[in-house]
Image (cartoon, rainbow, N blue to C red):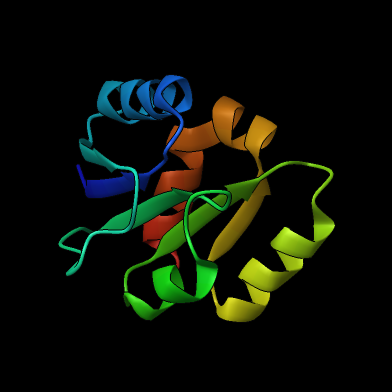
Amino acid sequence: MARVVAVVSDLMLASRVEESLLAAGHEVSVAPTLPSPVEADAIVCDLDSADAAAVAAAGVPALGFHSHVDVETKQAAEAAGLNLVVPRSRMSRELPQLIERLLASP
């Protein structure tokens, strides 16, 4: 079990993220913006809601998700140092597995 902060401003999407992580056995806190300080083992963030550079600077493994057509956001998040950056559809399908991968990476 990991403590995960989900930075998602859209309420419907936030509830799906929270439900998926809770079902996988994680402790979840949902916030519309990145809390300071981040007291978690991992961050899941909607790159429409969170600044990738600020998320990367938090020093916590981070998964960012974006619209599949928004290549610039993906590239900016990777350049900022997010550990994993995936399209929103993949995050929705594979979130528990992606968190496990994120937590297992060195």
In the image, residue 58 above or below residue 5: below
Between 28 and 106, the one nearer to me in the picture:
28
In the image, residue 24 above or below residue 69: above
- For the point 42% across and 38% down, the residue is 9
- For the point 72% across and 60% down, the residue is 74
Name the quadrant of the C terminus: bottom left
- Left or right: residue 34 versus residue 25 is right
Measuring from the top left, give residue 91's x and y in whole percent. 58, 36
Between 14 and 20, the one nearer to me in the picture:
14
Measuring from the top left, give residue 60's x and y in whole percent. 32, 69
Total numbered circles: 0
In the image, residue 18 above or below residue 50: above
The quarter of the displayed image where residue 32 is located: top left
- For the point 62% across and 57% down, the residue is 85
Measuring from the top left, give residue 89's x and y in whole percent. 68, 30
Task: Tell me, yes or no, if residue 72 can be seen here.
Answer: yes
Task: Tell me, yes or no, if residue 106 can be seen here.
Answer: no
- Left or right: residue 85 versus residue 56 is right
- For the point 52% across and 68% down, the residue is 52
Name the quadrant of the N terminus: top left
